[in-house]
Amino acid sequence: MSATVIEIAKVSGEPPAPPSDLEYLPQKFQMILDRARARGAVESLPYAGGLRPTEAYELFSAGHAFLVDVRTAEERKFVGLVPGTLHVAWMTGTSMTKNPRFLRELENKVNKEALVLLLCRSGKRSAAAAEAAAAVGFRNAFNVLEGFEGDHNERQQRRSIGGWLRSDLPWIQD
């Protein structure tokens, strides 16, 4: 998000609402969504599609999408987070129990017609969250591929293969 949008988010506690009518997005952003939808079609995904972290950032930072972090509160606190994101945990606590209120919480924060980008650690939980959201009518629910930290490397460590962090996109740590 631009500095102005982030400042507005800090003052109000919530990011400004992106437009819900995606037909009027500038062509550059339509092309990003077309690629994401094509990825989804190739994989027969039950949700709108998959965005690379840089594509998600372009849409989010331009104010055209909500970025919803579905990681636990503990992950956001101790690993880091993207400024201006909404938080709706797909799973909660250290036991990683599925959040039974996920869809209700998401519906309370985001209009079903809005462009919603779901982000987790690796892209797996956010894919499940996107599937659940699509099943209840979120037509523009996209998974952020690779997640915040990316995939494991040969030593079972994250942050070196893909992900938001590896793409050197904005983030903060508490």
Image: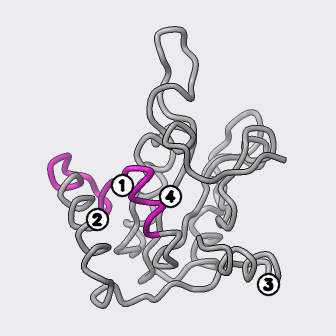
Q: CA distance from mark 3 to mark 4?
A: 22 Å
Q: Are marks 3 and 1 in contact (CB under 8 Å)?
A: no
Q: Is residue 156 magenta?
A: no
Amino acid type at image mark 2: Ile
Q: CA distance from mark 2 to mark 4?
A: 16 Å
Secondary element under disc 2, as helix, strand or loop, is helix
Chain-order first, disc 3 or disc 1: 3
The x, y position of residue 60, in whole percent, is: 50, 69
Nearest to the observer: residue 38 or residue 102: 38
Residue at image coords 64%, 47%: 71
Q: Quadrant of the N terminus?
A: bottom right
Residue at image coords 48%, 60%: 57
The residue that mark 2 highlights is 32
Query: On residue 118, which mark appears?
Result: 4
Q: Is residue 104 left or right of residue 33?
A: right
Q: Nearer the viewer, mark 2 or mark 4?
A: 2
Residue at image coords 54%, 72%: 66
Classify mark 4: residues with Cα within 10 Å, few (<14), some (14-19) or many (20+).
many
Q: CA distance from mark 3 to mark 2?
A: 29 Å
Chain-order first, disc 2 or disc 1: 2
The residue that mark 3 highlights is 12
Chain-order first, disc 2 or disc 4: 2
The x, y position of residue 20, in whole percent, is: 43, 88
The x, y position of residue 157, in whole percent, is: 58, 18
In the displayed image of the protein, which residue is found farthest to the left? 42
Q: Is residue 117 above or below residue 150?
A: below
Amino acid type at image mark 4: Leu
Nearest to the observer: residue 131 or residue 28: 28
Query: On residue 51, which mark appears?
Result: 1
